Image: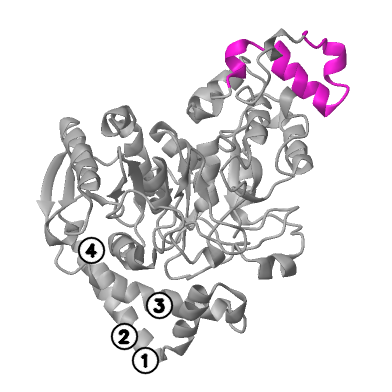
Amino acid sequence: MCRSERADFVPGCWRDAPSDLWKTPRVPVSEAFYSIDGFVRYCALNMRDDALDSNLLESSIREVRQKILTKEIDIRVPTEIAKTHRNLSPGRNTYLATNNENIQRQLDQLESLDHVPLAGVPISIKDCFDVAGYPTTSGSRFYQERSGIRTADSAVAQQVRSAGGIVTGKTHLNQLAYGLTGENQDFGNCLQPANPTLLTGGSSSGAAASVLEGSAMCAIGTDTGGSIRFPASLCGLCGFRASLGVGSWEGGQHLARSFDTIGFLFRHLEDALLLGEAIFELPRPKVVPRFNNIGVVDGNFLRDAEPEVLDGVATWARLLEQRGFSLENFAPIDWEEAIEIFRPIQASEAAKYHAGNFHEFEPEIGARLEWGASLEQRELDMLRERRDLFMQRMQQLFSRYDFLLLPTAPIARLKNGVDHRPVRDRILSYTTPVSVTGLPCLALPNRAGGTQLVAPPGADRELLGLAAALAPLRAAAQR
């Protein structure tokens, strides 16, 4: 089920509702709890008008939580709104699985959880993580047919629930999470809700769409070679990929263990640390470190970046400088090596996970898997040695700088229906220096495209904390 059958009574659907809906007589309390529909209608017609705004989920999570805590809105209202916004993307495929009864059971358990950090916050989960009550497809009909209904949550889904979040369903992705575009031959391409000519990017495609369409306030995704950062940049969203090893992959389907990280997409920078603490249980430092120096990537590395993307990075650099950071340009001399290291290791590890089934997937993905399976161990060992050396050189950069700033990708948009194979390596050249070294990264939205703010390994909390300081700057960065 994708949308409520009684959508005309559910908060958040005012854009589709009859113009005289507000004239409908109010529902008495005696009828409100006779059924789920009665309760929803009660919320829609008896609560304060500002709580009924269909744009409520575009507010920050902190703002919505404050309204819940002060009883300005009922704790169930954000999710009831979110339910009516599911699959509003042009392909109606933001979610590969969503179920009203599953959501309602979660809502029924909320009364004792209103003190937890994400209580009542609708959150989508990428369909490569198990969620009890749903199959796990990894974006493939082949795996959908063999999955069966999962009876237990993955670790990340359990963490979301423990924090009080409401899982709205399982979102679209490139097959096997092995792509950057949001295209999928089995389930259709994932398109931006406001512009059906543009792809969301991937592989966390449905994650981005769920936040854009208002069916989730946060979307759990994964980032191997840019699968959170790139959709965030195309869709004007914020994104966070954790350090390699942060968060549990129990109940998750890997693509390439050496590079797979967990993260999330969201709208408001001020929510970054709240989400990171709730989803990853990041430890609090005994001493709060001070960060001052930022290295800004420059030189020939940026030779193919679109001018509007570079303008966006320059805007963030200027705003950071105004906030008191010391910025210095530097030209990386060996970052092109990252993609040479990344692609074969990724393909080899993915081939092991999907051995014997290559022919079940899209031809391009099957070809990558075949190539990965053909690589000799000696070649892979040499690549891992090169990776170790690359990581050492990146660590040396962090002896000079506290953070690094660079474009997320050289392009600002992906047209639907166009062959994007020629730009795949161009995108990976910008994302894989972070992927190969397992670094945490905050994806910042530009007016067009996006910017990566990269921290040293393990500095996840510090990076998320900086996001709060950057929150007031976002509007200026997107002007």
What secondary structure is the stretch in magenta mostly built from? helix
In-front residue for pair 276/106: 106
Q: Earlier in the sequence, mark 1 or mark 4?
A: 1
Q: Which residue is mark 2?
A: 382
Label at residue 378: 1
Q: Are marks 3 and 4 in contact (CB under 8 Å)?
A: no
Please give left or right for residue 122 compared with residue 445 in the image: right
Label at residue 345: 3
Q: Earlier in the sequence, mark 2 or mark 3?
A: 3
| Residue 413 image point, x, y percent | 36, 49
Q: Are marks 2 and 3 in contact (CB under 8 Å)?
A: no
Label at residue 20: none
Please give left or right for residue 280 compared with residue 160 in the image: left
Q: Which residues are magenta?
A: 25-53
Q: Earlier in the sequence, mark 3 or mark 4?
A: 3
Q: Residue at x 13, y 43 (%)?
A: 327
* Cα gap from disc 1 to disc 4, whole angstroms: 25 Å
| Residue 104 image point, x, y percent | 76, 36
Amino acid under label 1? Arg
In-front residue for pair 403/173: 173
Picture quarter with the N terminus: top right
Q: Is residue 212 above or below residue 310?
A: above
Q: Earlier in the sequence, mark 2 or mark 4?
A: 2
Q: Are marks 2 and 1 in contact (CB under 8 Å)?
A: yes
Task: Give the number of the mark in front: 2 or 3.
Answer: 3
Secondary structure beneath label 4: helix
Label at residue 394: 4
Q: Is residue 126 magenta?
A: no
